[in-house]
Amino acid sequence: MAVTELKGFYVLPVSSPKSQVPHYIFFKKHDSKNSGSSTNNGRALFMCNLPVATSTASLKKFFQEVAIGATIESFVPSLLNDCPLDVWVNLTKLTSDLELNPELLSAQNADEEAAKLPKNCGIVSFVDKSAFQLAFNSLKKLSASAKTTPWTFPTFDSKYYLQRYQAKILDPEVLSESVSQALVDFDRAERESK
Amino acid sequence: NSGPPTKKQRKQLSAQEVQLARETAELFKSNIFKLQIDELMKEVRIKETHVAKIEKVLHRLHDLISKVPSVENLTLQQAEHHFNSKKVVIPFPDPKPTKLNYTFSYLPPEDVSLVGSFGLKTGIYQSQGSSIDIALTMPKELFQPKDYLNYRALYKRAFYLTYLSEHLMPLSKKNNLPIKISYHFLNDDVLCPVLRIESIKTENPEDLSFHKTKFTINLIVAFPFGVFDSKKLLPDKNCIRVQSDSDELPPTPFYNASILSMTAYDYYLKYLYTVKKSAESFKEACKLGRLWLQQRGFGSAINKGGFGHFEFAILMSALLNGGGLNGSKTLFHGYSSYQLFKGLIKYLATNDLNSGYLSFSSMIGENVNSKYKEDGFNVPTIFDKNTKLNILWKMTPSSYSELQYQANETLNLLNDVVKDRFDPVLLQKSDFDQMRFDVVLNLSIPEELSESFGPLEKISYITYESYLKNKLYKILKNALGDRAVLIHVRNEKSSSIFPINKRKPTNVNNNYIIGLQLNPEECDKLVTKGPNNDEQELGLKFRSFWGSKASLRRFKDGTIQHCVVWTAQTNEPIVLSIIKYALDLHLHSEISQHLVSEITTFTNKLPTPLLPSASSQVSTTLVSFTNLRNALESLNKILANLDLPLGVKSLSPASTALRFSSLLQPVPFAASNPDFWNDAVVQFETSTRWPDEISALEKTKTAFLLKVSELLNSETTYKSYLTKDDSITFNEDITLLNILTPEGYGFRLRVLTERDEVLYLRAVANAEGKQKALLQDVYLKFNQKYLGTVKHTRTVSQLAHHFHFYSPTVRLFKLWLDSQFLLHHFTDELVELLALKPFVDPAPYSVPHSVENGFLQILHFLANWNWRETSLVLDLVKSTALNDDEPSMKLSDRLTIQAHRVIEQNFEKIRKSDPTGIKCQLFVGSKDDPSGILWSNELDVPIATRLTALSRAALQLVKTEGLSDSNIDLLFTPALKDYDFVIRVKSSNITATSGILPSNTFKNLITPLTAFPDDISTQYDLIQAYVDELNNKFHNSIIFSTRKFTGLNEDNTNIVTGIFVPAALSKKKFRVNLGLDVKPVDDNSGEVVINKEGLLDQITLMGGDLVQSIKIRK
C-alpha cells in the first residue's frame, strides 16, 4: 500500500513525461496564522518538496491539467530554493534599526514570507476560496489514487546556463535608478528617525 | 652588607640574570626533550624476552665454535680442494691468489666476544630487524709481520672464515640450532666478508629458533690487535704492490684502514665501554644518534655514507675529551643525552672534518686531549693516534658534505624556540630520494667503461664502484660548482649478501643514483663563469675541463673572463644540460643517453600557455604573471586620476594569478580561464558619510562603481560593466565592477569601506541563537573577500619571488587536485598555504628547488598530517634558519612564541568543541590568519579525508613503483569507481580560449588570442554553471565534484561526480524543513527516505544537452 498521507500532509507523486521515476510533493492547506499576513487566508496551498525550478508558470500549467478553473493568484517559493543554505537571514535588520520602506528594499530581503519558508517549499495562492477548494479537492483525489501525475519541467540546456551568466550583468540605467531611489529612501528614513 | 645593591652590583646581577635566563630556556627545552626521549627510549627498547632468547643462542653458538677442529699448513691448492666447491667456496678478495709461498690454517680463535651496539647495549629495536656482531680473533701465530701486504692477511682470513662455516653447518644441525649461513660484506667492504647467520623456522620443538626476534648474527673474523705495525698502515702508505711505470705507487688508504679496523673490533668496544661508564647519558645519546642517522639514511655501510652508530659513538667519545682547536672541551660527562646529542650535532655542523680533521687517542686511562686541526687531507678524517685508524675511512667528501648538511638542518631545528621539533629531528624518516634531492638522476654505466679501471685505480679505490662514484662526484662537482649545494652519488646495490658457495655476489649492479640539492640563486644561471683572462694557469684548467664550449667574454664591468654559455631549454633544468655535457666529455662520449631523470616529466605536466614566448620559457618564469600585475598597476594609475567625489586611495591585488599561483598562466583575452577575472579591492579616501546600514552602504558603493564605469567607458580604452556578486551570503546588494583592459586582462573590483567590518560585526553581535553561527560564517566570508585575500596575496607574492619553485609547484599541485576533482572544493588560498608548507617549513627535508621535490613534499605532508589532532601553523617568512643574517628579514617578521601560542590555543578551542573535526578539518594558522579557519571553514569531512587518502595513495605508488612516465600519468588519473554516480558532460571548445596550447598541436597552427568577443560570457564554461546549480539545489544530499578547468580536458568533455552525503541516507521522520528530496517509506511509519532515483532524474534533466551519459554505481 502506497503511503498517501503523512503527518497531515497529502502525498502527490508526479513525474516528468520522459521518466517513470516518481517525485513526491507533500501538500496541505496553508494555515497562515503564524505568518501574520492574512491576505490569502483560506485560499492557499502549502507545498513541500517541490521539483527543481518550480515556478508560477509551471504550476499554472499543472493546475490547468488537473483542476481546470483553479486560477492561481501567486506563488511564493522559498528563498532557499536557489541557495545552499538552510536558513535565510535579513542582514538589514541585524545592522540597523531604521524602518525602511520594504517595497523599495531589495525585493528578496523584504519578502519575509519567502525568507521564512524552508527549502523546496512554496505557497500557492488561488484567486478565491472556490478556486482553492477546486484545486485542493483535485489534488487530494490524485493523492488518494496514488497514481503518478505528469509534471512539466522547464527546459534546461546550454542556453539556460548561458543566460544565468548573462543575467549577472546589470543594466547600468536600471541599476542607477534603483540605487538612487534606495538612497533617497534611506536618507528620508534616517531623517525621520532623528 | 644588607643594603640595596650598588650600581655596579646591579649591573653584574643583570648580566648573570641574562645568563641564567638563557640557561633556563635551554634547560626547559632540554627537559621537554628529555620527557620525549624517555618516551622514545621505551618504544625502541629491545624486548627482554628477545634478549634472553638471543643470549641462549649466542651461548650455543659459542659452544659450537669451540668444537671446530684445527687444521694446519695447507697450501693454496690443498686449501681450495679441502672444500666441496658446490657447497662452500673461499671468498678470496680480488685478485684471487694463484701462487703463494705461505700456507693456510685454522686454529681455535684467540678470543670470541660480542662487539658492536649489542655488546655495548646501545642497540635499539628496528622493525626490519637488526644484527649482532661477534668477533672471532684469529690466533697470532697464524700471521707473519709482513702479512699486511698484498692481501696476504685477507687471504688467510678468507680461508679461516670458510673453514669455520664449513664446520658450523653440520655442527649446528646436530646441536639443534637450525641456521642458514651466507657471506656478507660487512658495511659493504669487499675486503671484509663475514658469516651472516639467520634462524630457520622448523617444526621441531627442541630446535632453538630465533627468527621471531628478527635478529641476525654476524660472525666477524678479526686480526689480533697490534699484530701489524700500524705505522705501515697509515692512510698515506702503499700496502699493495703492483707493477707500474711510475716511480712511486699511490697510497692505499682504504685497504690500510680496512686491515686496521679488522684488528680493532674488540679494542674499540672496550674503549667505548669505558667511555660509557664515565658518562651517564652516553648510552642514551648513542641511541638518539643511531635513530637520527637511520632516519636520514646514514649508516656505517659504504653505500649509506660510512657514518653510522659506531662512528657517532667514537666521535662522541672523542668530544668528551676535547675537540676544540686547543683541545678545549666540547662535551661534558655530566651532560644529559639531549645535550650530548645536540653538542655532537653542533660539532658536525660547525666544524669541517674534510678540510680539517679531528685527532684523538683511544688509549684507555691516558687522557690525551682530542684536538681539531685546521689543515686536513681533503678526505673526511677523525684520526685515532693510538690505532692510526681514520675512523671515517668509509666516508667520501660527498657523503661527508651530506652529513654536515643534515647536521646543519638539525641544528636549526634544535635551536627553534617557537616550535617543538622532536618529530622531524628523530621520528620522521627522511631518506626518500625524490624529496631529499631536487634532481634525481639514474645512470646506467656501460660495460666498456670498466677499461678505465686500471691496476693503480684498483689499489686506490679497491672496487670499481668506489672508483666510479669518486669519478662521477669529481666531474659533477667541477661542472656544477656553486649551482649544487649537495651532490650525492651511490651505487644502486641490491644486496651485499651472497651464498657461501660463491666467491662474490654474482649480479653486479651498474646503476648509479645521483641526487642533487640545488642552490636556487645559482642553479639557473645561463653563464658558468671561469677565471679572468690574465690568470693563465687557471684559464688553461678551465678550458681543458669545458673543452670546446669554453669561450672568452667581456662583461659589463669590463672584465674579460673565461666562461661557458648555456641555452635554456623548455622545462629541462640547466643543471641537467651541464651534467650531460660534462659527463659526455669526461666519462664516456655517449653516457648522457644512459642518464634518466623524471624531472622534466613533472614540469611537462604543467599546461603550456597559448603565448608566443611559451616554447622558450623555463618553468620558473613569472613573465606572464608580471604582465598581469603591470596591467593592474596601469589601471591603478588611471583610477587614481579619475574625477570622483572621493578619490581612489588604493587598489589591492587579491587574486590567485596576481600572486603567481594560478593553475593557468594569465594569457591575454583568455576569457574561458576560470581565473580570468582577477579580484582587486578598492578603497576610497576616508569618509564619515558611508551609510550605517548594510544595504544602503552597498548601494552607495554601487553608485561609486557606476560612476567609475561611466568614466572608464567614455574616457579610456577600458571596457567595464557591473555584475551582481553573490559571494557573501545574505548580502544581496553587492555589485562588482568588471573591467576589461586593453592588454586583454580582466579585473573585478570590489569596494571596501571603513564601515563594512563594523556592520558585519554588528550583525554577529545582534544575532541570536542558531543565527549567530551563520552570521559568524558571513563575517568570515567578508573577511576572506575583502581583508584576508589582500593580506594573503601580499604574503604569497613575496614568497613566490623568494622561492623560485613555489609558483610552478603550487600550480602543479593545483593541477593534481583538479585532476582528482578536488580543486573546486578548496579555496585557492588554502591550496596555496598547503603548498607553502615545504617551502617555509620543510623539516625533516629541505626547501625544495624543483617542482618534483616540492610536489612530492606537499603530498608527503598531506599524507602524514593527522589534522584531527594537529594544527598546521605556518611561519610565512623567507627563511627558517635562526642565524640568518639576511638584512631584508627582520626578526619581527617571524612568529613569536606568543603569537604561535595564540594560534595553537585557537586550535585547541576549536577541537574542544569539535574533537573529531566534523565542522572544521584543516586548521591552517599564520600571522595573516591566527583563526586558522579563514580558508578552510567550508570544507567537508569527506573532502578532507579524500585529500589525505589520495595523497597517501599517490605517495605509496611513487615509493613502491617508482617514478616512471606511466606512474606519473597514473597520479593524475582520477579514481571514478569511488563515486556513487558519474556524469559525462560536454560543453563547447574552450581549451584555446582558456589560454592553453592544445596538446598534440603545432603552435603555429593555433592563432594567439587578440581580442575579446562581443559578449564575453559566451566563452564561459557552462559545465561550471551546471555544477553550481546542482550545488544550490542538492547541496544537502549530494557532494558534487568536477574539474574546475574543463579546458584542460581533451575534447571539451568533463566529468561531474556525486557522492550521497551519508547523513542524508538514513530514514527520517517527515518534517517540512528536511531540505532533502524524499519519498515516503512504504510501511506507514510516517518516515521518509531520500528519493535517489528521483534525484538522479532531476539531475539529468537539469543537465539538458550538456549531459552525455550517467553511470550509477550499483
Image (tube, grey):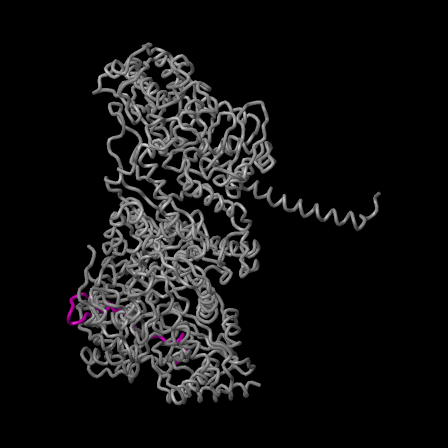
Q: Could you tell me which quadrant the C terminus of chain B lies in?
A: bottom left
Answer above or below: position of A25 versus B51. below
Point 23% across, 39% down: residue? B447
Point 37% across, 49% down: residue? B516
Q: Which residues are magenta?
A: A9-37
- Nearer to us in this view, B673 or B78: B78
Residue A188: % across, % down: 51, 89
- Nearer to us in this view, B147 or A191: B147
Q: Could you tell me which quadrant the N terminus of chain B lies in?
A: top right
Q: Quadrant of residue B197?
A: top left
- Nearer to us in this view, B1046 or A80: B1046
Residue A33: % across, % down: 39, 76
Residue B1086 in view (yes/no) = no
Answer above or below: position of A30 versus B1073. below
Does the stretch in magenta take in A32? yes
Marker count (numbered): 0
- Nearer to us in this view, B513 or B197: B513
Residue B428: % across, % down: 42, 43
Point 57% across, 44% down: residue? B29
Does the stretch in magenta take in B1078? no
Residue B50: % across, % down: 40, 25
- In the figure, is residue A136 to the left or right of B873? left
Answer above or below: position of B960 versus B680. above
- In the figure, is residue B540 to the left or right of B1092? right
Residue B26 in view (yes/no) = yes
